[in-house]
Image (spheres, grey):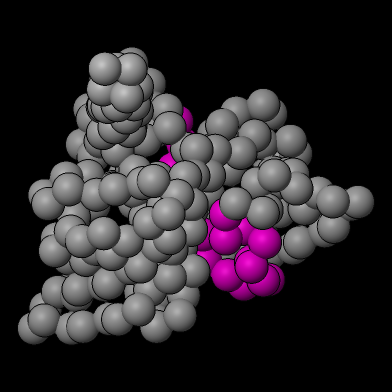
């Protein structure tokens, strides 16, 4: 479980394909604090640390076919900046919102607008997948916990402050950039329950 508060945007130092898997090697400031089998969020994707090189300050994770097909990790290149966050501990403040590290779908950045010290980003996603946002609700974009602005079916905006712009990979986003989305877990459960309820009511009406 994560909070969506990114610790740093770290570079990819190497990518290695092995069958349908992709081994991603990252370089970051907290490598010496990592351990094998630890969970780390990469652009909002929970991956397991499988190798550590403390001398080179690098670690490696493996993304399988399922992950590559449903996220933007397959688009990474050497030098790409990736948002990193280690999993929460029970005594850690929840500064963002509950993020599972399970990406629901990708979205495309369709607009970037500077607003005299802050930035507005517009993202569009396939609404046929059944995911929704709500005004002032929470959403994870590349692992960053953000508040939804201008919520519409298949589309929403977020406002980015200078700190987030610099610390995360948002400063590299442009029109056409593909990002990972994880929708609010509480909202997803409510939506699932309501869908089941409405389906049941529809069946009852047909029987009458």
Is residue 154 rendered to the left or right of residue 49?
A: left
Is 20 located above or below residue 116 in the figure? above
Q: In the rendered image, is residue 94 in sight?
A: yes
User: Is residue 75 shown in magenta?
Assistant: yes
Foreground residue among 127 and 40: 127
Is 203 located above or below residue 4 in the figure? above
Query: Could you say which quadrant of the image residue 13 lies in?
Result: bottom right
Foreground residue among 20 and 114: 20
Is residue 71 rendered to the left or right of residue 5?
A: right
Q: Residue at x 91, y 51 (%)?
A: 19
In the image, residue 111 lies at what x, y percent? 30, 81
Q: Residue at x 62, y 72 (%)?
A: 79
The quadrant the N terminus occupies is top left
Q: Residue at x 53, y 49 (%)?
A: 42
Is residue 67 rendered to the left or right of residue 205?
A: right
Q: In the rendered image, is residue 197 in sight?
A: no
Residue at the farthest right position: 19
Is 82 located above or below residue 184 in the figure? below
Is 153 located above or below residue 38 in the figure? below
In the image, residue 5 lies at what x, y percent? 31, 45
In the image, residue 9 lies at what x, y percent? 45, 60
Query: Could you say which quadrant of the image residue 118 lies in?
Result: bottom left
The quadrant the C terminus occupies is top left
Is residue 47 rendered to the left or right of residue 108?
A: right
Q: Residue at x 26, y 59 (%)?
A: 153
Q: How many marks?
A: 0
Foreground residue among 11 and 196: 196
Query: Could you say which quadrant of the image residue 188 lies in?
Result: top left
In the image, residue 130 lies at what x, y percent? 39, 46
User: Is residue 132 shown in magenta?
Assistant: no
Write down the region rendered in magenta. 71-87
């Amino acid at each position: 479980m994560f909070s969506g508060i990114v610790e740093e945007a770290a570079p990819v130092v190497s990518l290695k394909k092995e069958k349908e898997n992709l081994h991603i090697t990252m370089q970051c400031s907290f490598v010496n604090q990592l351990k094998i089998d630890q969970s780390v969020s990469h652009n909002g994707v929970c991956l397991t640390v499988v190798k550590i090189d403390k001398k080179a300050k690098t670690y490696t994770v493996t993304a399988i076919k399922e992950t590559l097909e449903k996220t933007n990790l397959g688009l990474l290149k050497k030098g790409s900046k990736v948002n990193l966050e280690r999993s929460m501990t029970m005594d850690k403040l929840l500064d963002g919102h509950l993020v599972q590290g399970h990406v629901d779908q990708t979205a495309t950045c369709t607009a970037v607008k500077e607003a005299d010290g802050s930035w507005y980003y517009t993202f569009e996603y396939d609404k046929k997948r059944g995911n929704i946002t709500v005004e002032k609700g929470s959403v994870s974009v590349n692992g960053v916990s953000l508040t939804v602005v201008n919520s519409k079916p298949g589309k929403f905006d977020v406002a980015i402050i200078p700190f987030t712009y610099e610390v995360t990979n948002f400063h590299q986003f442009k029109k056409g950039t593909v990002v990972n989305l994880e929708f609010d877990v509480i909202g997803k459960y409510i939506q699932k329950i309501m869908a089941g309820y409405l389906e049941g009511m529809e069946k009852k009406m047909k029987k009458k």
